């Protein structure tokens, strides 16, 4: 049996191990471990992304943060989680089926109890090596498939995040444009307020001037009323003087008539 590369364990007489010189089997085992570690690392990254998604959901934001949260939620909740769960289920189902098939083949290939012990042990070791290789190949294929699926999931999530960031940048530009428009309108409103303030000051000054003019008009009205009263008094005096002058004219005419009569009498007296 030493020629076949088998080593007997001193603590257990009927236990054997696989040949230590089979470096290909060890290389496959190490490669499978590396793939499993890579798969676990990707799963941890996905879980960390889900934790970040939950944090973003707990702390809702605005703008770019909101769209990034939506992309993370969509990617990890729909694509990433579904693909990883399916990959793990396929891996477990495949390992279970292959293990059951190899177990049945191993039980079927075991010789009867009366056969040689070395032949039985050799058959068992060969079947165990075949099972190990089959499991390793299946594990490598499944881990490669899971890694590809996880990478496609991460790529899709990165694409969603990139599109979300681009959309957020567009919204940022639109918000900047709206902010500039609001700033221009704010400047116009401020200028209009200044014009309104100037107009209010002008209106106040004109109101003061109007009040001064009203005062002057009141004074002129009083003066015109006084002049009207003086004109009425002068007209009354003129009317009285006119009546008096008419009386004097009548008296003068009477006196002139009397003088004429006296002259006639004087002329008659002279003639006599």
Image (cartoon, rainbow, N blue to C red):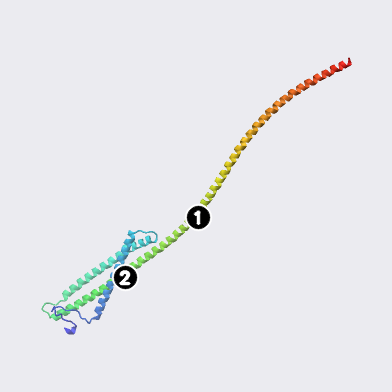
Q: Nearer the viewer, mark 2 or mark 1?
A: 1
**Is residue 141 in view?**
no
- Could you say where residue 157 lies in the image, as x and y percent from the top left? 35, 65
Q: Is residue 251 above or below residue 27?
A: above
- Could you say where residue 46 lies in the image, as x and y percent from the top left? 31, 66
Does residue 260 appear to the left or right of 79 in the view shown? right
Q: In what element is the residue under mark 1?
A: helix
* C-alpha gap between disc 2 and disc 1: 57 Å
User: Would you name the residue on which mark 2 appears?
Assistant: 148
- Could you say where residue 63 lies in the image, as x and y percent from the top left? 40, 60
Q: In what element is the residue under mark 2?
A: helix
Q: Nearer the viewer, residue 75 or 65?
A: 65
Badge 2 density bin: few <14, some 14–19, many ≥20, Cα 10 Å: few
- Could you say where residue 29 lies in the image, as x and y percent from the top left? 25, 76
Q: Residue at x 70, y 26 (%)?
A: 240
User: Would you name the residue on which mark 1 appears?
Assistant: 187
Q: Is residue 149 above or below residue 59?
A: below
Task: Name the image quarter holding residue 270.
Answer: top right
Q: Residue at x 31, y 65 (%)?
A: 48
Q: How many marks?
A: 2
Q: Nearer the viewer, residue 98 or 192?
A: 192
Does residue 28 appear to the left or right of 113 in the view shown? right
Q: Residue at x 72, y 24 (%)?
A: 244
Quadrant, the N terminus: bottom left
The first of marks 2 and 1 along the sequence is 2
**Residue furthest out toward the right:** 271
**Is residue 217 in view?**
yes
Quadrant, the C terminus: top right
């Amino acid at each position: 049996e030493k020629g076949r590369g088998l080593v007997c364990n001193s603590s257990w007489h009927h236990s054997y191990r696989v040949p230590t010189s089979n470096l290909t089997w060890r290389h496959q085992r190490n490669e499978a471990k590396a793939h499993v570690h890579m798969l676990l690392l990707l799963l941890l990254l996905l879980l960390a992304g889900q934790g970040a998604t939950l944090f973003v959901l707990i702390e809702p934001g605005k703008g770019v943060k909101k769209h990034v949260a939506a992309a993370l939620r969509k990617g990890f909740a729909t694509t990433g989680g579904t693909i990883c769960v399916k990959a793990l289920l396929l891996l477990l189902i495949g390992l279970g089926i292959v293990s059951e098939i190899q177990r049945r083949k191993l039980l079927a290939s075991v010789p009867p109890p009366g056969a040689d012990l070395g032949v039985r042990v050799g058959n068992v070791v060969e079947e165990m090596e075949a099972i190990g290789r089959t499991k390793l190949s299946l594990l490598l294929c499944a881990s490669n498939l899971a890694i590809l699926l996880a990478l496609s999931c991460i790529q899709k999530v990165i694409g969603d995040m990139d599109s979300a960031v681009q959309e957020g940048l567009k919204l940022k530009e639109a918000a900047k444009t709206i902010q500039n428009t609001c700033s221009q309108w704010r400047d116009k409103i401020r200028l209009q307020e200044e014009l309104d303030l100037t107009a209010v000051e002008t209106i106040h000054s004109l109101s003061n001037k109007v009040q001064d003019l009203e005062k002057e008009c009141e004074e002129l009205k009083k003066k015109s009323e006084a002049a009207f009263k003086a004109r009425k008094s002068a007209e009354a005096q003129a009317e009285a003087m006119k009546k008096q002058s008419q009386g004097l004219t009548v008296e003068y005419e009477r006196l002139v008539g009397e003088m004429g009569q006296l002259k006639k009498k004087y002329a008659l007296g002279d003639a006599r």
